[in-house]
Image (spheres, rainbow, N blue to C red):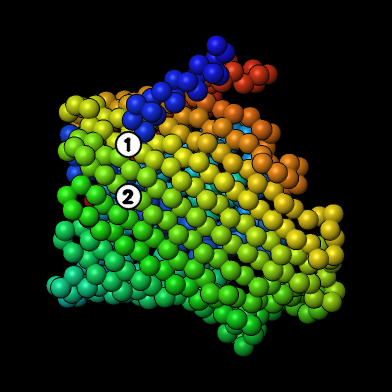
Amino acid sequence: MTTRRWGISLGLGALLAGPAVPEILGAQADTATLHATLKGWEEATWLQLLDRGGAVGGRLSRNGMLQRFQPLIDDEYYIDLISGPFGLTEEHVWYRQPNGARYWGASVNHLELATAFDIKTHIPLSGAWTATVQFNKAHTYEARRDLVRLEFDHAWKSGAFAGLHGTLEAIKPDMDLEARAGYRSPGGREVGAALGVLDAFSDVIYQVLVVWEAYADTALDYQRQPFTVRAWGEWPLGNRLRLEAHGGLMTPTTVRAYRQAAPDSGFRQHERYGFAAGMLEWSPLARLRAGGFVTYVRAQTDRTPLPLSPAEDDYVLTESTARFGGFALAQLAERWRFEGWLARTARPERRDMRQLDSLSVDFEDRMLTGEARLTYGAPRGLRADVSFEFVNRDVLRGAGQVVTPELKNHSRLRLEVGWSFGERAAFRAGYRIDVDGDPGTGKGHFDGAEGRFVVFW
């Protein structure tokens, strides 16, 4: 059996023995933190729409709204994004803490790290009013994000809540507003809905006040303003089941983007965006969780060129990503925890060119990904874990029609050590060991490194 096949067999065996993701911050024996969540996925998907200027290709890229296929993405990038980010149980802890900061960084080549940094602080105001400030920073081959969010909320004793949230950006037309309301009970139930307006001040700035062309070569004119609708919920179903659901969409939008020096140079674009996700978690025993999840996001851009623009701007682009899988979390002993997940991802993309048929695209790739991790650690003191992770990727159709990395399957072992300071802070650093025998790299079994930290106050 080859080294790669041995590595994949080892990983699949561990996953089948108990399939979700990394560690917790507090005491491992505290099974209150032995849960998964999709709130991290929902926030990342929402920020992709909220901060379109933070995409690598920018707001007006011909690569669409999801912008998944970039020339700098190599064949190990997808497994690097398993090694670096926080996992499901860490996400569960993060989204239940009002104040904190966290960072992760993972090597993606000899020069760069893929990184993300989040900070949030929750400030009581007068009465039942609170203010929350959040900052989200990301540096990957898909996003370059530096986003500040300001939120004002009011909570009633009955459990009802309402608030007004907004983004603060240097480019004033990119700022957004959202109003939300819902109900939250002490028993873990929460339901909510929100209505928003994207690029809320764009037409006032570009069309009423007017921006000097030396500051902005391109201006936007919304002929149908983008509005958003979101809903979310979390419900315990009896004593052993928990359901989590998220969904949102952007109303059909039409925008004209044009050069201010030549208004007939540019394009008119119709846009749609929507996402949905669900997770069911089962607790058969106090120290065991298992469940399944599904996520879906879809975007469509229908672009037509203005009279002075090229035929490359005459197309309909439809992008979608669907993912489903399962996870398991087990508190094996007071200081030992197992976490694992397995997922299948499909990424179709279709570009129908109206004039240049040779540039049309009908592409789809699929990935099977997974991770199995065993963690040792006390509430305070040394933490150590070993994990196996893999990515198997195939192209179903349209090979060569989009920029994608070479088709290679990858697997690795990851060793991490760190220190936990109770419920206040945890720090980690890891060493990655190649087990798939990458040829010609000249680096032996060394497959990069990563690190992360989280602090709460």
Residue at horizontal 57%, vertical 80%? 225
Name which of mark 2 and mark 1 comes first in the sequence.
2
Residue at horizontal 22%, vertical 55%? 236
Q: Residue 280 carries which label?
A: 2
Residue at horizontal 26%, vertical 52%? 242
Q: Is 404 on the left-hand or right-hand side of 323?
A: right
Tell me, yes or no, if residue 116 can be seen here.
Answer: yes
Given the image, on which type of amino acid does mark 1 rest?
Ala
Q: Is mark 2 on a helix, strand or loop?
A: strand
Query: In the rendering, at what x and y percent does residue 276 appear?
Result: 45, 59
Q: In this view, does 180 lie above or below 89?
A: below
Sort mark 1 into few (<14), some (14-19) or many (20+) by Cα contacts within 10 Å. Answer: many
Q: Is residue 241 above or below residue 445?
A: below
Front-lying residue, 260 or 436:
436
Q: Is 365 on the left-hand or right-hand side of 101?
A: right
Residue holding disc 1: 328
Front-lying residue, 240 or 374:
240
Tell me, yes or no, if residue 55 can be seen here.
Answer: no
